[in-house]
Amino acid sequence: MVLAQIGPEGVISFFDYGQYIAVQGTGCWSPEYLDAHFADLAGLLGRRRRDRQVLVLVDLTRAGVQSDETAERIRYWTANLYRQSDRVAIVLASSMLKAQMRRYVMVADRELFLSRTAALAWLLAKPA
């Protein structure tokens, strides 16, 4: 299954690989665009939680540094969408983005990476 929010700012796509959900984002997003993305993701996560732990690989290697307002929406959504048992691995292209996401991504079990391979290994390392 693929879901995508497409806008003038960039694209955010979802892929359900069965074992985990992959999210890929490019460019920069307005707060409204991000709200639509997280609303779609909430539905997918809700269906996933019915029968297994939520594992999410977020690839933002082609995303830009977000505005403060958009970053605040990321903080809001991640604090309210993810549960204690969810695992989220986030791949970023730079240390600057890694620092920004460290401040704004509110997920109990999350790690930030500069390598997709390392992120996926971490995500799948613990039994679901």
Image (cartoon, rainbow, N blue to C red):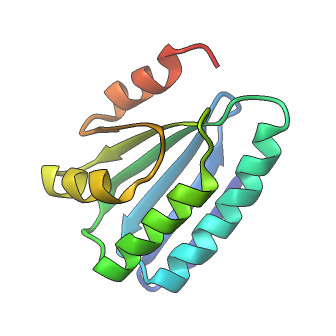
Confirm whether residue 83 shows in the render: yes
Farthest residue, direction left: 95
Query: x, y percentage for residue 2?
Result: 68, 54
* 79 lies left or right of 122: right
Q: Eyeballing the image, is 51 above or below 39? A: above
Query: x, y percentage for residue 95?
Result: 14, 49
Q: Nearer the viewer, residue 62 or 112?
A: 112
Residue drawn at x 43%, y 83% as measured from the top left: 30
Residue drawn at x 41%, y 78% as measured from the top left: 29
Q: Eyeballing the image, is 87 above or below 127? A: below
Q: Nearer the viewer, residue 108 or 96?
A: 108
Residue drawn at x 53%, y 80% as measured from the top left: 33
Query: x, y percentage for residue 83?
Result: 62, 43
Residue drawn at x 50%, y 67% as measured from the top left: 76
Total labels: the figure holds 0
Task: Determine which quarter of the picture holds residue 51.
Answer: top right
- Quarter of the picture containing the C terminus is top right
Task: Determine which quarter of the picture holds residue 75.
Answer: bottom left
Q: Eyeballing the image, is 91 above or below 124? A: below
Query: x, y percentage for residue 107?
Result: 48, 46
* 15 lies left or right of 25: right
